[in-house]
Image (cartoon, coloured by chain):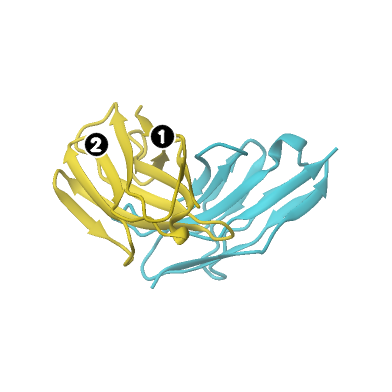
Amino acid sequence: GNSVTQMEGPVTLSEEAFLTINCTYTATGYPSLFWYVQYPGEGLQLLLKATKADDKGSNKGFEATYRKETTSFHLEKGSVQVSDSAVYFCALSESGFQKLVFGTGTRLLVSP
Amino acid sequence: SQTIHQWPATLVQPVGSPLSLECTVEGTSNPNLYWYRQAAGRGLQLLFYSVGIGQISSEVPQNLSASRPQDRQFILSSKKLLLSDSGFYLCACPDTDSYNEQFFGPGTRLTVL
């Protein structure tokens, strides 16, 4: 079946550090890939997405590139801020379906 | 765009008590609806989805049930809660602006003692 694997957290960084959160997936077919973010005490918000191979999703300084050859969708940001502290979820959705398969989430803690 | 309401926002219930969580959606008609659970230390897991009134698909065997009595209403229930039912419950529907995305409600945090 489909699955998403994320790096274990928490990830602890200082402000302005470079961020990478790894995500790899297993899927039959051609999934769409997503990063969702959950800020403390809130629900999930879509951060960015990519719907086909080599697409790059970007938003709020975050980027992720859909790599079919390595089945990966790693999240990156060049300079994190304290306000980026949250839990980040990688997810996939099979083409034509709307059910999401999530990774376990990675907590990011950014200190001043 | 759509809005999802969930209530209650937080709930503390004893083991063995019943449960009813409600989700209502505005700004869209006949949406697919989803219940997810985020348990402590675990990721989000799809529990149920519904493609229309009275139609429920269960993704995992469990102590919970779901119902869809109206087009934009989705209810999660249990007759007797277990400790393992504790978690953060999220209702979702397809984003009206981008069909392959899901839009999430604010969630209900359930603690079973």
Tell me if residue B82 can be seen: yes
Question: What is the quadrant of the N terminus of chain B in the image?
Answer: top left
What residue sits 44% from the left and 50% below the top? B14
Measured as percent of width and height from the top left, residue A107 is found at 67, 52
Is A65 displayed left or right of B32 in the figure?
right
What residue sits 50% from the left and 52% below the top? B113
Q: Chain of mark 1?
A: B
Q: Earlier in the sequence, mark 1 or mark 2?
A: 1
Instruction: Using the image as rendered, state which of residue A25 and residue A12 is in the foreground.
Output: A12
Chain A drawn colour: cyan
Q: Quadrant of residue B85?
A: bottom left
- Could you tell me which secondary element the residue under label 1 belongs to? loop
- Rendered view: A82 above or below B48: above
Tell me if residue A52 can be seen: no
- Rendered view: A86 above or below B81: above
Instruction: Using the image as rendered, state which of residue A100 and residue A28 is in the foreground.
Output: A100
**Tag 1 near tag 2, CB within 8 Å:** no
Instruction: Using the image as rendered, state which of residue B18 and residue A77 is in the foreground.
Output: B18
Chain B drawn colour: yellow
According to the picture, the residue beneath numbered tag 2 turns out to be: B73
According to the picture, the residue beneath numbered tag 1 turns out to be: B8
- Could you tell me which secondary element the residue under label 2 belongs to? strand
Q: Quadrant of residue B92?
A: top left
Q: Chain of mark 2?
A: B
Q: Give the amino acid at mark 1.
A: Pro
Q: Is disc 1 in the same subunit as disc 2?
A: yes
Marking on residue A17: none
Measured as percent of width and height from the top left, residue A66 is found at 53, 58
Q: Residues within 10 Å of mark 1 (few under 14, many from 20)?
A: some
